[in-house]
Amino acid sequence: MSLYHSTNTDFQEIDLLKSRRHKDFGQGFYLTDIKEQAEDLARKRVLISGGNAIVQRYEFDEKSLTNKTLNILHFETASVEWAQFIYKNRSRILNFHHNYDIIIGPIADDGVAYLLDRYEENTITLEQLAQKLKFKKLNNQYYFGTERSIKLLKRIYQ
């Protein structure tokens, strides 16, 4: 399968230490299977940070997702468990770390970030958060968080 990474600076090798912390699934390398989404994200990144809108294409063998040596988490939809996991990863207060190699699940957009803030402020309950998330249209993201998972990605130069 083809996966796409949005950036404003091209690079040849993935360096997990250069990834930002406090993202949906933690510090790691993020991709999407929707090229148009990656293009939009790259353009937004340029508006914020400058540079050039670049979409890198990678090939990933989906059979790797059944590899029993990898620790994989898959959120099919936005759920209470998904929201809690994102909240823990995005929190600058909690010192949360996980040991997943690959995580697949919906992207928490700005609207989700707003809802997570309301939850953190205790103005909505976890159940209310989950209910509100059910009505959001969310695209999937693919998180690769370890060197062994990164080795499964093959960059395709066009």
Image (cartoon, helix red, strand yellow):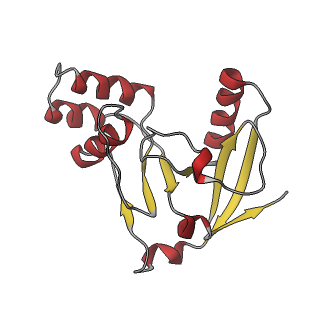
Q: Nearer the viewer, residue 17 or 108?
A: 17
The quadrant of the picture occupied by the C terminus is bottom right
Q: Position of residue 142 (x, y in %)?
A: 51, 54
- Report whether 32 appears left or right of 58: left
Identify the residue at horizontal 36%, vertical 61% (top origin).
Answer: 73
In the rendered image, the vertical position of residue 44 relative to residue 102, given as above or below: above
Q: Count of labels shown?
A: 0
Instruction: Locate residue 93, reporting x and y percent.
Output: 30, 31
Q: Residue 83: name its quadrant.
A: top left
Residue at the far right: name it: 158
Quadrant in which the N terminus appears: bottom right
Q: Nearer the viewer, residue 100 or 155?
A: 100
Horizontally, is 45 left or right of 69 in the view? right
- Classify 38 as above or below 28: above
Residue at left offset 38%, top offset 36%:
90
With respect to residue 126, does 102 lie above or below?
Answer: below
Q: What residue is shown at x 67% (from left), y 42% (from top)? A: 6
Image coordinates of residue 12 in percent, x first then y, are 78, 55
- How far across and down, in percent of the image, does residue 136 sit? 36, 34
Residue 152 occupies quadrant: bottom right
Q: Residue at x 69, y 60 (%)?
A: 58
Q: Most extreme residue toward the bottom, as rendered? A: 68
